[in-house]
Image (cartoon, grey):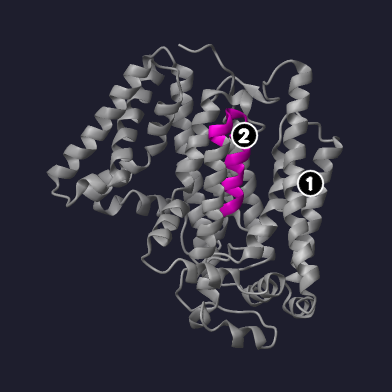
Amino acid sequence: MSAAVALRSLREPLAALAIALGLLYLLWFAGRAPAAPHHLLGELLDLRSFPSVDWLESFAGLWQGAAIALAAVPRWPLRRRLVLLAAGVALAAIYQIAIGRPQWWLYAYAFLAGAGLVAAGFFAREALRGGERRHAAYILAGVVVFAAFGIVTKTYLIHSSVQAAPALDWSALKLDAAAFGFSPSAWAVHATPQGSVPRVALAIAYELLPLAMLVVFALEVRDPRRLPFGLFRGLFACGFAAALLYAITPVTGPAYALGAAFPNGLAPLLERAPALLATPAGMFAPRNAFPSFHLAWALVALLLAWRFGWPARAGFGLYALLIAAATMALGEHYLIDLVAALPVLAAIAALCIERVSLRSPVRRQALAGGIIVYLVWVALLQPSWAQAVSAWPVILSAWCALNVAAGVYWLRALLGEWERIGAGAGEERPQTAVKASVA
């Protein structure tokens, strides 16, 4: 059994969750949103079909994070953990054979869900009368909070799609083509044809982002002292920032706004007069492209896992690269969306980081710098401005390079300051680490 470790309180993410739910329900009661969070929960769990195979699979799928935590957190003997995970995998195999699912051995999702269901049952028992009550209860509560975050996010995206604000996609396309000399999104789509192995692999990587974040949660439970801030603080900070920034710079992504012109007929679109674009009525097209928080969340995972050694750095670094490639190949983003994500993430990290004083120059520079960079993008994305500045492609290219360099510099500086203060204090315990609390 491992030594006692102070866990971050869940009060902060629970408060953030309550605020997000309150705002979404206000929109729903005001008639501005077509669905409320409980509607999404019902769909997620297939409650209309209860009891059924679909409901059972949906319910089991909620607990995949429990399996990841059981595998990664050494609070219980390794042999017991392996037996429990194997039992879950066997249970999933038996279930799939019983319902007659063809090629059941290919359904990795089902095996992880089965292992998660068994792990959740184990944690529930431990939380009631086991020797590691705190950690078991914390893991269960964390998985629930993570699932609730996903429901809140999906509810917001539906609201954004239905509102159908005029999109700045023409500007994004114009800036992309001017800065890089071609459309990187169109090139990525051509380089990974539909149905090809690279396209399928990138699509899978794109969908695995929640599981990657759950791996970070498991690492945090394993040793919270190694993280510069908690996963849930980063998730909710990014979530609130995304809702605000998407309202200011509504961009949908080329696959949604450019229609039949993407990816083969962009030349006439680039030559047309500056304009805001609309998306087809009834299409699910949330304005959630600029900046790319898909990439930002992947980079949050890398930042938080940085102190877990080179395997974690290599794994999460490679995954961030795959996410960047996937967002382009699937037509979800323009390259400038990814470029702008770095300085914006640096500003968010400056808000979230523990131990470093708010008066620290490093923290203030990252926060102010990220905000200023984003405000410049707000101006550049106005159609008339995008048309004007596209006449200076070298300046745009340099601006994009500056975004990447500044974002990386600020993130490294924040992490370096956090490590320096920890070394000076002779400990790695985060400033806000407290006893685990699920309320």
Give, as a three-letter code, the residue at label 1.
Leu
Residue 209, compared with residue 193, is above or below; it is: above
Q: Residues within 10 Å of mark 1 (few under 14, many from 20)?
A: many
Q: Main secondary structure of the magenta part?
A: helix
What percent of the width, then of the height, locates residue 386?
74, 76
Give, as a three-letter code, the residue at label 2.
Trp
Quarter of the image containing the C terminus? top right
Total numbered circles:
2
What percent of the width, then of the height, locates residue 338?
63, 58
- Give the residue displayed 27% in from the left and 47% down from the top: 107
Q: Which residue has dot 2 on it?
A: 306
* Real-space CA distance between mark 2 and mark 1, rounded to the nearest whole angstrom: 21 Å
Q: Nearer the viewer, mark 2 or mark 1?
A: 2
Nearer to me, 124 or 178: 178
Instruction: Name the mark on residue 367.
Output: 1
Residue 362 forms part of the magenta stretch: no
In what element is the residue under mark 2? helix
Instruction: Name the mark on residue 116.
Output: none
Q: Answer with left or right where residue 117 lies relative to residue 141.
A: left
Q: Answer with left or right where residue 169 lies relative to residue 411.
A: left
Does residue 93 appear in this view? Answer: yes
The residue range painted magenta reads: 294-312
Nearer to me, 111 or 6: 111
Residue 420, compared with residue 374, is above or below; it is: above
Q: Residues within 10 Å of mark 2 (few under 14, many from 20)?
A: many
- Give the residue displayed 68% in from the left and 70% down from the top: 180
Residue 295 forms part of the magenta stretch: yes
Does residue 32 appear in this view? Answer: no
What percent of the width, then of the height, locates residue 315?
52, 40
Nearer to me, 60 or 47: 60
